[in-house]
Amino acid sequence: MKLRLLLGLGAVLALGVVGSTARAAAPGAFTRPGAFAWAPGYTCSGGAIPGGTYTSLTVAGNCFFGGDVTVNGNVTVADGALLNDHAFSPLATHVVITGNVRVGKGAVLGLGTYNPAAVHDTTVYGNIVANQPLSLYLSFATVQGNVVSNGGGSGPNGAFRNFPTKDNTIHGNLVVQGWNGGWIGVIRNTVGGNVIFSHNASVVVETPPGCDPELGQCTGSAPGTDSDSSEVQTNWISGNLICQDNTPAAQVNALDGGLPNVVGGKGIGECAGLTG
């Protein structure tokens, strides 16, 4: 499995050359902010991260943004830590990270907001890289670099059984591979590079039937495959869309409002028929 995941990641680099023409049609690139005045680093072991400006941010516990935050450097979410499950943390309106975000094993990263009527002003000027995370909750965020998530998930047990990547603008590549949990989906994103969605498996069915796992409305789970999982739909992708070895197979779910993906490159594997 590790070899397949690494090969999948390597494909991003190879396809980046092939898809360079397509990526020219991506949204206008951001310019990284210039020099800033000195500000201290901050480590959060739990609770609210005070609004302010920091040279770095380390999350070592269960933390959320307690105000507008600018990090003129990198953010690290340590193994097993939680940063701002954003559906429940409405205090931060503006979040700016000029460096990279790294997410450790068993950690959760929430950036953006589920509320389409809220102010959407969360920007990461670097990359988001997650190594065996419990989950990522990314919605209405802007990422100038790449978003890469490799492995992880809750398996059949535990909280944060869902992995929603929705309504984001990602100027680089989006890679989600090897995650095992409940529901996972890539929906309504604008991606300037390639999208790779591979080796993800739903091993949990959310209960009661008819609840919406994307909105956290489910109160229980049972072993099995969620037939609504692996939704890859309504995305605008300048490069290629590659899907392989997912359980269930990648799909456009019309019952959930899904539409075919608009792809500047090619749809490959399970996603060959998911473009329009």
Image (spheres, rainbow, N blue to C red):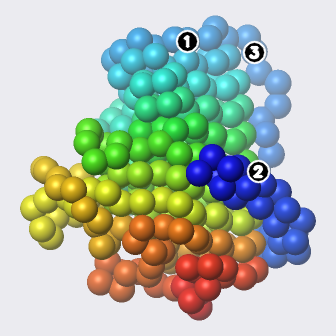
- Give the quadrant of residue 85: top left
Q: Image height check: is 146 above or below 27?
A: above
Residue at numbered disc 2: 30
Residue 186 appears at what percent x and percent y?
A: 49, 65
Estimate the spatial distance between the alpha carbons at disc 3 and disc 1, rounded to whole Å. 16 Å
Of tags 3 and 1, the one toward the viewer is 1
**Residue type at mark 2?**
Phe
Question: Dot 2: few (<14), some (14–19), or many (≥20) neighbours within 10 Å?
Answer: few
* Mark before the other along the chain sequence, 2 or 1: 2
Estimate the spatial distance between the alpha carbons at disc 2 and disc 1, rounded to whole Å. 26 Å
Q: Image height check: is 239 above or below 90?
A: below
Q: Please indicate whether residue 202 sits to the left or right of residue 150 in the image.
A: left
Task: Please tell me the numbered disc located at residue 155.
Answer: none
Of tags 3 and 2, the one toward the viewer is 2
Q: Is residue 146 visible?
A: no
Residue at numbered disc 1: 42
* Mark before the other along the chain sequence, 3 or 2: 2
